[in-house]
Image: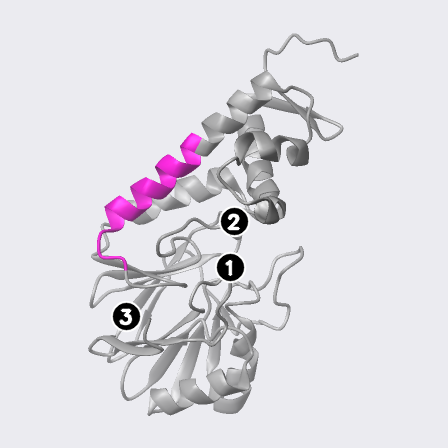
Amino acid sequence: MPRYTELAPGVRRLVAPNPSMMTGPGTNTYLFGKSSIAVLDPGPQIDAHMDRIQEMAGAPIRWIFVTHTHPDHSPGAAALAKETGAELLGWPAPDGDHQDRTFCPGRTLADGDKFETDEFEIEAIHTPGHASNHLCYRHAETNWVFTGDHVIDGSTVVIDPPDGNMKHYLQSLERVKALRPAALLPGHGELIDDPDRAIDWIIEHRLQREAKVLEALRANPKLTAGELVPHVYQDVSERLYGWAERSLLAHLLKLEEDGMASNADGRWRPIGDTTSPC
């Protein structure tokens, strides 16, 4: 994947040098405009990446947008704003682990807020699920939706409760699909030029996983989320079981909300199960 790409007139992508199992080739930083620049997701605070963003901008950076405050997306925002004087836009970090407390937006964007300049228009779309403060951004001129970690290229994302919420995630996927975007620009990986296919695949995958969780519950009542992982994630390496447990818990909480499972002292059972609790 090229480190720097011009995707359309006035839309460029720069890949941060933070490749990993969780970030793929690295976090995508996007630049909008030519004479006055907006940056989306400056990524982790890596000095070389901050320098590269300013070099590639080629004009004053006036605004910095953030999709969410996970550590691979937003920590560079404060440093870049300090160097450029740019305004920070997005949502502040919620409570919980794995959140970037350095991101303090000067403007908190409401769902549906539109940001307009002489060169581009961006609409904020609240898409909770992967993170409660997650925003996607629709670029009006191209009808592209920049999805952060809501939809990524070729994979699914971890839904990590309590901030992550599987029910909200599925609802937010349907909402983005209903926008009929021409393409999805993810926070990791390449442009997705068939949004319906990509979103439908994620929804189907999540519902199939949910069905496996319910099947495992019926066969193995009174197990904890961690004890259920090997029954549900036979297709996943054991080294990923820790992350798998987080998404499995998100599925369990959705089943509980849907009235299909119950939890007592961390042990789960399907609703209607008649096994003795003793």
Label 3: which secondary element = strand
| Mark 2, other Cα within 10 Å: few <14 / some 14–19 / many ≥20 | many
Residues shaded magenta: 192-208
Which residue is under mark 2?
158
Q: Residue 126 falls in which quadrant of the image?
A: bottom left
Tell me the kind of residue under disc 2. Answer: Val
Describe residue 206's horizontal placement relative to residue 93 as left or right. Answer: left
Q: Is residue 74 above or below residue 219?
A: below
Q: Residue at x 52, y 70 (%)?
A: 74
Which residue is under mark 1?
22
- Characterize the magenta stretch by its predominant secondary structure: helix
Q: Is residue 199 magenta?
A: yes
Q: Position of residue 93 (x, y in %)?
A: 59, 62
Front residue of 9/214: it is: 214
Q: Is residue 233 visible?
A: yes
Tell me the kind of residue under disc 3. Answer: Glu
Q: Do the residues bearing badges 1 and 2 touch, measured as CB atoms within 8 Å?
A: yes
| Mark 1, other Cα within 10 Å: few <14 / some 14–19 / many ≥20 | few
Q: Position of residue 152 (x, y in %)?
A: 38, 56
Which residue is under mark 3?
121
Label 2: which secondary element = loop
Q: Residue 256 falls in which quadrant of the image?
A: top right
Tell me the kind of residue under disc 1. Answer: Met
Marks 1 and 3, Cα distance to the nearest angstrom?
A: 31 Å
